[in-house]
Image (cartoon, rainbow, N blue to C red):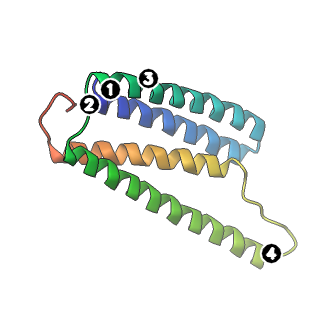
Amino acid sequence: MTFNRYICFRAILESIGAIACMLMALIGNNLLGVIVAAIAALLWIGGEVWGMTVFRRQNPRRDELSDMHQSAAMQFALVSLVGILVIVGFIYTTLNLIDRSIVHIIPPMLLPALAMCALAISDIRYLWLEHDAGTEGDDED
């Protein structure tokens, strides 16, 4: 398995976790959302440990272009997450100012959903940058 294929599987798992958390935020069943998110997180952690042990030994990634792509992807995900959090905060603040009779509370599962979504965005952006670069090597999918 190549590093890029591993990143693709990781992005899929993170997307499933984000969708599960978002559905639980919309449905309102936070216990089920926590269980699904915990399972996704444990699979993600297991994959990270496996990836670190396998890819450090077999296919070390030390080229500058890949490092630049990882850095750009993380910065993109961070800026996206901060932007979304600002928008969500602004919406809920505005709702509370408009209708003072009902307190609008941000669903607890929304924050883990946004965090997992940011991780997936980072991985997808990295794969996009790697694909656009057209680097030749054994990690190209």
Q: Quadrant of the N terminus?
A: top left
Do the residues bearing badges 2 and 1 touch, measured as CB atoms within 8 Å? yes
The residue wearing badge 2 is 60
The amino acid type, in three-letter code, at marker 1 is Phe
Q: Residue at x 17, y 27 (%)?
A: 138
The percent coordinates of residue 52 (x first, y second) are: 40, 28
**Residue reaching furthest to the right:** 101
Q: CA distance from mark 3 to mark 2?
A: 14 Å
Q: Nearer the viewer, residue 94 or 4?
A: 4
Q: Residue at x 58, y 33 (%)?
A: 41
If you read the primary sequence from the N terminus, does the residue marked by circle 2 or circle 4 appear first?
2
- Numbered label attached to residue 55: 1
Question: Which mark is in front, 4 or 3?
Answer: 3
Do the residues bearing badges 3 and 1 touch, measured as CB atoms within 8 Å? no
Compared across the picture, whether 127 is left or right of 95 comes to: left
Which SS class for mark 2? loop
If you read the primary sequence from the N terminus, does the residue marked by circle 3 or circle 1 appear first?
3
- Numbered label attached to residue 99: 4
The percent coordinates of residue 120 (x first, y second) are: 45, 43
Which SS class for mark 4? loop
Q: CA distance from mark 2 to mark 1?
A: 6 Å
Which SS class for mark 1? helix
The amino acid type, in three-letter code, at marker 3 is Trp
The amino acid type, in three-letter code, at marker 4 is Asp
The residue wearing badge 3 is 50
Question: Which mark is in front, 2 or 4?
Answer: 2
The relative height of residue 72 versus residue 55 in the rendered view (above or below) is below
The amino acid type, in three-letter code, at marker 2 is Pro
Q: Residues within 10 Å of mark 1 (few under 14, many from 20)?
A: some
The relative height of residue 53 versus residue 96 in the rendered view (above or below) is above
